[in-house]
């Protein structure tokens, strides 16, 4: 049965577009929010209903809409057009992109070039007045020590998860017996390596060395349009951040892996868009193993109370236990690979 548009949805479409008489279609959602296709027989839009919870204080709608409005105002067109938002009801309305989700077969030099054009287009306008109004990105880190503490904090949260029985107990056992020790080794090595490369752990990045980051940047948040044009989506974590973090996330996100053969070209493109290119390259060298472990932690978010509620909000009807088992298997494999590469 097709869901009826809520009064808030209808009003947002009317205010943003002047159109009425809309129909709502539920789309396959991501891990955080509910997503709908809105139609009136002529035009089509995409509407997102953002997750909100007292235990998750991120302003997902505010971050995504501000970032999208900034990018669109600066002529960056490889993203959905931001049309309107309703903060009271956590709704955002965007232009609808017709395309498909990419697979690993799509990841080649043209895909890397498209991602870099997006990145460089954003940061070409980093000195615009509007850019100064953008927030810091979610889990933004401006010293090496902050990156390391972020991993320590995530591991600590997982260590404190409820044990329970079945797959929950299995996940907690994995965290205690394997993930915690692996993270400690990676962090210790990062501290040593930073010293060898002459990088101070507590030195903040200068403003000129920071970047405007889409955050959670990768082809898991992209759409292939037509015969190979790329569009990028989902900016609820976006804002000012360390470019080294963006590079590490780009190559560590597991959904649509990017071959390491492209690391040099991508890193050069990102580093050249900000000051301190040489330092950025050294920071990536130190932080890449740290972010492999961080992504292991992210894979286990379903086992945490707020993370589980967020997944349920976005994906009603998906079996929670089945997804947990899949995520635990992925985390085990990712940890083994990270430690082997380390």
Image (cartoon, rainbow, N blue to C red):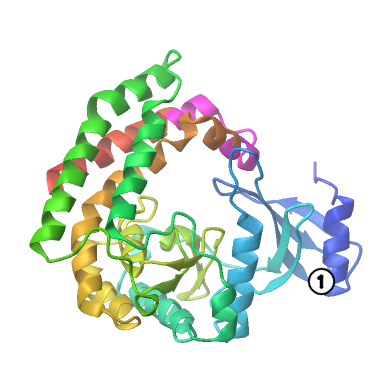
Which picture quadrant has residue 326? top left
Considering only vertical position in the picture, is 279 above or below 334? below
Residue 159 lies left or right of residue 289; in this view the side is: right
What residue is drawn where x is 65% and y is 58%?
A: 61
Q: Quadrant of the N terminus?
A: top right
The spot of residue 270 in percent (x, y) is 32, 76
The spot of residue 268 in percent (x, y) is 25, 78
What residue is drawn where x is 37% and y is 56%?
A: 256
Residues in magenta, as a range: 310-324
The spot of residue 85 in percent (x, y) is 75, 64
Which secondary structure type mostly characterizes the magenta part of the structure? helix
Considering only vertical position in the picture, is 17 above or below 316? below
Residue 316 lies left or right of residue 224; in this view the side is: right
Judge whether residue 316 is colored magenta. yes
What residue is drawn where x is 83% and y is 73%?
A: 17
Q: Which residue is mark 1?
A: 16
What residue is drawn where x is 66% and y is 44%?
A: 52
Q: Residue furthest front?
A: 202
Q: Nearer the viewer, residue 2 or 167?
A: 167
Which picture quadrant has residue 114? bottom left
């Amino acid at each position: 049965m097709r869901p009826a548009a809520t009064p808030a949805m209808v009003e947002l479409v009317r205010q943003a577009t002047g159109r009425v008489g809309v129909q709502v279609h539920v789309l396959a959602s991501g891990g955080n929010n509910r997503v709908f296709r809105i139609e009136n027989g002529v035009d089509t839009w995409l509407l997102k209903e953002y997750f909100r919870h007292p235990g998750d204080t991120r302003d997902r709608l505010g971050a995504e809409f501000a970032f999208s409005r900034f990018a669109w105002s600066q002529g960056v067109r490889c993203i959905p057009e931001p049309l309107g938002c309703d903060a009271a009801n956590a709704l955002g309305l965007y232009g609808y992109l017709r395309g498909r989700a990419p697979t690993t077969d799509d990841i080649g030099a043209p895909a890397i070039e498209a991602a870099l054009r997006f990145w460089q287009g954003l940061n070409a306008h980093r000195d615009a007045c509007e850019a100064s109004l953008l927030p810091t990105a979610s889990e933004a880190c401006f010293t090496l020590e902050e990156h390391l503490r972020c991993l320590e904090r995530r591991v600590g949260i997982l260590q404190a998860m409820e044990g329970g029985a079945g797959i929950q107990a299995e996940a907690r056992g994995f965290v205690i017996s394997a993930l915690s020790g692996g993270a400690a080794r990676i962090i210790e090595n990062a501290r040593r390596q930073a010293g060898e490369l002459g990088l101070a752990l507590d030195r903040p990045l200068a403003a000129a060395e920071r970047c405007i980051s889409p955050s959670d940047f990768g082809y898991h948040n992209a759409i292939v349009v037509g015969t190979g044009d790329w569009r990028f989506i989902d900016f609820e974590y976006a804002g000012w951040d360390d470019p080294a973090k963006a590079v590490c996330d780009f190559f560590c996100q597991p959904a649509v892996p990017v071959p390491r053969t492209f690391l040099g070209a991508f890193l050069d493109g990102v580093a050249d868009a900000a000051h301190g290119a040489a330092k950025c390259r050294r920071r990536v060298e130190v932080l890449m193993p740290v972010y492999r472990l961080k992504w292991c932690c992210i894979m286990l978010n379903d086992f945490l109370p707020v993370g589980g509620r967020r997944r349920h909000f976005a994906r009603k009807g998906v079996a929670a236990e089945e997804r947990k088992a899949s995520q635990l298997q992925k985390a085990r494999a990712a940890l083994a690979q990270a430690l082997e590469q380390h």
